[in-house]
Amino acid sequence: MTSIDLDALLRGTPFRAVARLGAGGMGEIYEAIGPFGGAPVVVKVLRAELADRAELVERLRREGEMLQFLSHPNIVVSHGHGTTSAGRPYVVLERLVGSTLREELLRRRVLPVREAVGYARQLLAALGAVHQAGVVHRDVKPGNVMVCATGRGRRIKLFDFGVAKVEGDARRMVAPIAFPTREGFCLGTPRYVSPEQASGLDVDRRSDIYAVGMVLYALVAGRGPFDDIVAVDHLLQAHIRQEAPPPSRFMTAPLAPSIEGVILRAIAKNPADRFADVVTFRDELRRALSAARGPRRRGPVRRIAWAVGYPRRAATDRCRICTVAPCVPPVAYGEAPVLARSPQGAEVHRSGGSDDAITVAWCGVATPLMGPPDDVCGAPTDARMGVVARDGVLAGGPEEGKSSFHRSISRRGVFCSAAAFFAVAGGVAMWFVR
C-alpha cells in the first residue's frame, strides 16, 4: 500500500497510519500515531470489502465497547474506537512488542512445561477478569495471545475480542448486537473450539476453559490432539465425539501425571466434567506443578544466612567477612623463635621455646651454638660483620634497625598465613552469602 493510501486510511479520525502490520479474518492492523505524536498505537480497521456487511461492522463496534471496561495486566489496553470517514469501523489498541504464542511454537516447536504452565496461568488470570465482567471470549488460541518481554520476565496479553459473547450485567454496558449469532452456527477457530461450539449450541465460560486446555496441550506437546485431521467438518466432529489422546503420547520428554491430568480434565467433552471456573483451573495447575517438582530436600546443615536486598548486599558481605576474619589462626607466628643472647654477644634464637634447639645467626646462616663462632663464614665475626650487640639488635648487619618481633616473621609464614586467611574467611563468607 502506498503512502497516499496510508494517509487516507484513517481520515476522519485523530490518528494517522504509518505502517501496515498485518491482517486477520475481519480486519487489517496498522501502526499509527496520534495528532500530537507520542507513543505509537495499533489501529484495527475492518477490511474494505467487508465494510458493507452490517453484522461485521457491529462486531467490531462491540469489541471496542467491551475493551473499554476490561482492565487487567494480561489484557490488551484499548484507546478508543470509532468510524473512519469512509464508514469503516476501527479500534485503537496499545502497541504490543513481542511475538504471539503461535509464532513461539513455530520457532521453538515445543515449550518447557514450566514455561507453558506459566503462560496458561497468566491466560487464565486474564480470562478471570473477562468472565467476571460477563464476557466469554470464544476465540482463545495461540494466535490471539501475545508474549511481551518486561523487566520482570515475560507477560502475555490476550486480544481480539471480535467474536466475544456478552452476557449478564455486561449487556447494560455494551449495546446488543443487531445481528445475533444464528442457532447452529459455529464461531471460533476450528482447532480450538469446544464441543458445544462445534455443535452450534449455547456456550459459557467453560468453553474458554476448553480452549485454554487445548492451548496448553499444544504448548507442551508441540501439537494439538487432532492436528492430523485436515478437513474442517471432520475436525469439528473430532471435538464433539473423539477422545483426545494424552499429550505425553506426542512428547519426547516425560510429562508429570499431575499436569497431564489437569490438561485432560480441561478438555473434557462434557462441560460439567471440566473445571467450574478459571480460578479453580489456575489453582489446580499450581498444585500440579508443585507436585511435579516433588518435595524440597533439606540439606544436612540448616542455613544460617538471612535474606538481604541487593543494595545492602555488598555492605553485608563486608560485615560478614570482618566477623569471620578474627577466627583465622595466625599461623605465621605460631612457631616464632625466642630471642636469646650467646656469651659471645651474637644473637641466638630458641626455636619454639625448646631448650635443646638453640642456634646462632652469623652471616645469614643458622649454626648450632657449640663454641666460639670465630670461624663461621671463614673469618672472625668482628672482622667480617662488625657485630656489636645493642639492646638485642645485631649492629652492622642486615637486621640492624629491626625489632626481634619483625625478625621472627618468616616470609613463608606470611604467605601461609595469607593463604589460610583467604581460604577460611572466603569459604565461611560464601557460606553466609549463598
Image (tube, grey):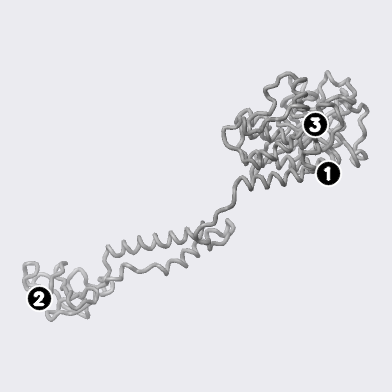
Report how far apart the C-alphas of labels 1 and 3 lie in the structure. Answer: 32 Å
Question: Few, some or many C-alpha atoms within 10 Å of disc 2 (few <14, some 14-19, many ≥20)?
Answer: few
Question: 390 left or right of 315?
Answer: left
Work out whether mark 2 precedes mark 3 in sequence or the reverse, and give the earlier one.
Answer: 3
Tally of numbered tags? 3
Residue at 71% x, 42% y: name it. 122
Answer whether residue 173 is visible to the viewer in this image: yes
Dot 3 falls on a residue whose secondary structure is loop
Q: Which mark is residue 132?
A: 1
Q: Position of residue 40 (x, y in %)?
A: 73, 34
Residue with the mark numbered 2: 370
Amino acid type shown at disc 3 = Phe
Q: Amino acid at mark 2?
A: Met
The local secondary structure at tag 1 comes to helix
User: Residue visible at 31% across and 62% down?
Assistant: 416
Taking depth in this image into account, of 258 and 324 the one nearest to the observer is 258
Q: CA distance from mark 2 to mark 3?
A: 106 Å
Earlier sequence position, callout 1 versus callout 2: 1
Say left or right for 340 vs 194. left
- Kindly state the secondary structure of the residue where label 2 is placed: loop
Mark number for residue 15?
Answer: 3
The answer to whether 85 is drawn above or below residue 75 in the figure is: above
Q: Is residue 10 visible?
A: no
Q: Nearer the viewer, residue 376 or 262?
A: 262
Q: Is residue 431 left or right of residue 337?
A: right
Q: Position of residue 18 (x, y in %)?
A: 73, 27
Circle 1 packing at 10 Å, graded few (<14), some (14-19), many (20+), is some
